[in-house]
Amino acid sequence: MDYESNGWISDGVYYYPHLFGGLMLTAALLGLSTSYFGRIGVPSLPCSWSDLGIFHEKRRGKKRIRVYMDGCFDLMHYGHANALRQAKALGDELIVGLVSDEEIMANKGPPVLSMEERLTLVRGLKWVDDVITDAPYAITEEFMNRLFHEYKIDYIIHGDDPCMLPDGTDAYALAKEAGRYKQIKRTEGVSSTDIVERIFSSQKQKDMKDIYSDARPQEGSHPAGAHVAQFLPTSRRIVQFSNGKGPGPNACVVYIDGAFDLFHAGHVEILKKARELGDFLLVGIHSDETVSEHRGSHYPIMHLHERSLSVLACRYVDEVIIGAPWEITKDMVTTFNISVVVHGTVAEKTVNSESDPYAVPKSMGIFHSLQSPKDITTTSVAQRIMANHEAYMKRNAKKTASEKRYYEEKKYVGGD
């Protein structure tokens, strides 16, 4: 039997030390010198090494682990993204189950985003390999068997926060009983319930400003009723979300900027179109102060580092500038070697802006206006919630109580 190289010997020793040692001992007892194993073949043995089948697994390659994680992913935020990032780290391929609008309505109340919008957001995440639409809210035995046999799922993943069905039972009980359940750490400081509260607070702040339009809050103070986020940013989290790669020396760098508040399907689609114009997409994310100045004091709803993580999680984004300037300067274009500057046709209404922030790239002939694929904005998303104020208040009352209980009983959970 001929072999391409003698590397199979070292592979055998490394991957199968006990079996290989036994074979070597057998060969020694048969009177064969171990130097024989450095030759092309071992004709004296009754069968060839390949016939033993001990190296076939190495040749075929290691089995790819497929993991599954489901969710509503309504009001998609960096906590969702981090959960999916952790889930992907537990396997090789991440399949996401997206709960249908009907299932959400039956179990939680009306969704804010449609199935199409939620699908765009989930598919836009860099860690997601495939999506199963219309997944059930509760994993039934029938659906679990489909996951294992049709989709070849090895493990079902969920966060350490309890997920209870309306009847009080554990939504992942079957997966746990089957021994195919793995747990990840919940991302602290954000939830869809928390974001709805922020939107309510933002609207209240706007209404108060309209009533007392002449009153100016002191710098650094929080208006009465304003929601204070509990997110604690770390450099490690930013590194985990980052691609860690810069543009090549001759890369066409495309730049787009904005607030990217309440990261939504419109953001994903415009980032995808922008990325198609070059080799490297650089995204400028405006600071909280800049957003407040040019969009209104009741914005942003999500803070700078939260918005940065949401953008970094998008598969079309290569790098972000955290706290990008409102106006693009020639020095900035030179520093980042920007070839094209783009801006979508759909954007929030701008206030307190006397000059054109894109005057320089326009004068340089590198500005390009992109037709926005969707007309959704941060304001329109917030308006959906305000239009169903009572329904979301009722839903939040339940969720707020369960989250309070979670934090009161919370214990340290390892993970990242």
Image (spheres, rainbow, N blue to C red):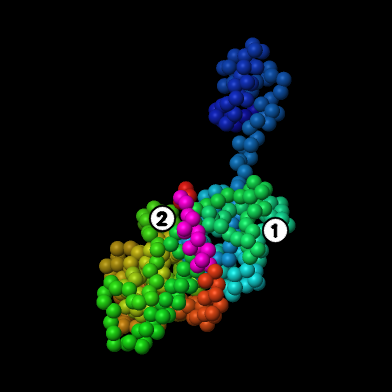
Q: Which mark is residue 151?
A: none
Identity, as a three-letter code, of the amino acid under mark 2: Arg
Q: Is residue 45 above or below residue 257?
A: above
Query: Which one is in front, 239 or 284?
Result: 239
Identity, as a three-letter code, of the amino acid under mark 1: Thr
**What's the residue at 35%, 84% (across, down)?**
209
Left or right position of 110 against 382: right
Q: Where residue 80 appears, x then y in whole percent? A: 51, 61
Q: Where residue 405 appears, x then y in whole percent? A: 50, 61
**What's the residue at 54%, 79% (across, down)?**
390
205 within the magenta span:
no
The residue stretch that appears in magenta: 399-412
Q: Residues within 10 Å of mark 1 (few under 14, many from 20)?
A: some
Which label's residue is closer to the chain start, 2 or 1?
1
Query: Which one is in front, 395 or 342?
Result: 395
Query: Which one is in front, 151 or 155?
Result: 155
**What's the residue at 55%, 75% (across, down)?**
394
Find disc 2 in the rendering and name its residue: 237
Q: Is residue 89 above or below residue 24?
A: below
Find disc 1 in the rendering and name its residue: 140
Of the 4 image quadrants, the one containing the N terminus is: top right
Q: Kindly state the secondary structure of the residue where label 1 is placed.
A: loop
Q: Main secondary structure of the magenta part?
A: helix
Q: Where residue 23 appears, x then y in whole percent? A: 64, 21
**What's the residue at 71%, 53% (across, down)?**
145
Q: Is residue 391 visible?
A: yes
